[in-house]
Image (cartoon, rainbow, N blue to C red):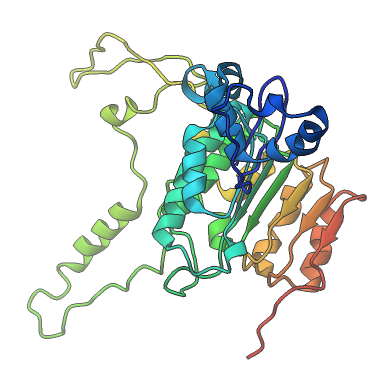
Amino acid sequence: MSARPAAEGAGVSSRGCCSLGTTSRGGLLACPPEILWEIAPRLLDSARPIGQLACASRGLAQSLCSTGRGSSRGLRVGSISTCCLTALVEGLTHVNRSDLELLRLDLSAQGGGRCSRVEVERALWELSRFLPGAAALRKLSVRLASFDVTMERLRLGTEAWEALIRGLGGLAHFRKLQSLELSYVTMKASQATHIMGRTPQTGAPGRQLRRAASSPTRGTGTHVAAAAAAAAMAPTAPTARQGLLLGGFGGQPSTLSLREPDGESTAPLHLPVVAETAAATVPQSFLEVLQQLTRLEELRLTHDEIFGSTAQLLPPVLKSMRKLQYVDLTRNHIPKQVMKEVRAAMPKDARLVGDDQQTFFFY
């Protein structure tokens, strides 16, 4: 995690582990200028010395932290780069959202097999809550691991996948994101087109059972069963009580007039509506959210088990990205013909990587 003072703009990396004593009255400033010039850049590029300096200097501590409310409160951090889920969650909890410009999580650097699926999904939940307030975020990179702690393939559940889509949808509202990477995240066609809030259909409806030929009631219950099945499949109109939950549009309070059974209308009800982004209120799929990232310059979808059926859905999305310069689809299962279609949908000056690095299974 890197911190940056407002006046200096200095980056801070979490990889630094040196210590700096500030208990003496002279401290670091008492060193000769040539020594200070030599060691200061190294110390200011480490998180621990910056923290110790902040504890000794009230002015530095005030410049590192924001005292606002909500998302504008916390440590003023320019970037977070970590391979630890705990560090990610702690960082997202204590940093100022409006100052963060780069966020990178790389679990593949550890080789996988160190985190459980529950821990990964919990971290993605925290990330999805953080992204809608990251107004200055320009680069987002999420690289998961191939396997979890039980050496099973790490696949996100439906709720975690929807949370990630919801976070990206809130981030697309600011139109600042320039680079997006989602690696080792399974993206089958059913997931890419999955609408948030809808339960995916896992199979075909079961067949209708028939009564035995010796049953005395054979033929009497078939019409009733068919009518019940048709009623269950038919869409139902919202009731008056359900209509109260629909709210208004555009953040304006809606007025709803209910009618009693005798036909007389009651007094209108004014329903306040909380103003939210369109991505948070309108059900969307991953492809629809991706299409809203019109300022995207780099897109990396590697090791995501993307097959040809999923890759065929990418060209309409890529056409909306006018500033796209780089697309990486390495280590997926995309045929060459589909890769040509993806390349044709990209801008002429954009570069497509991974055409010759696809994985196919032959049985």
Image location of residue 75, percent across then percent down: 55, 28
Residue found at the very far left of the displayed protein:
216
Residue 346, compared with residue 151, is above or below; it is: above
- At 58% from the left and 65% from the top, the residue drawn is 110
From the viewer's side, name the closer residue of 248 and 215. 248
Picture quarter containing residue 57? top right
Residue found at the very far right of the displayed protein:
349
Asked if residue 141 shows in the view, the reply is yes
Picture quarter containing residue 171? top right
From the viewer's side, name the closer residue of 287 and 217. 287
Image location of residue 94, percent across then percent down: 49, 33
Q: How many marks?
A: 0
- At 74% from the left and 62% from the top, the residue drawn is 329
From the viewer's side, name the closer residue of 236 and 128. 128
Residue found at the very far top of the displayed protein:
267
Image quarter hosting the C terminus: bottom right
Residue 259, compared with residue 293, is above or below; it is: above
**294 on left or right of 59:** right
Residue found at the very far bottom of the displayed protein:
363
Image location of residue 137, percent across then percent down: 66, 35
**322 on left or right of 115:** right
Asked if residue 75 shows in the view, the reply is no
Image location of residue 268, percent across then percent down: 31, 10
- At 59% from the left and 21% from the top, the residue drawn is 25
- At 62% from the left and 68% from the top, the residue drawn is 305
**112 on left or right of 290:** left
Image quarter hosting the N terminus: top right
Residue 200, compared with residue 102, is above or below; it is: below
From the viewer's side, name the closer residue of 248 and 104. 104
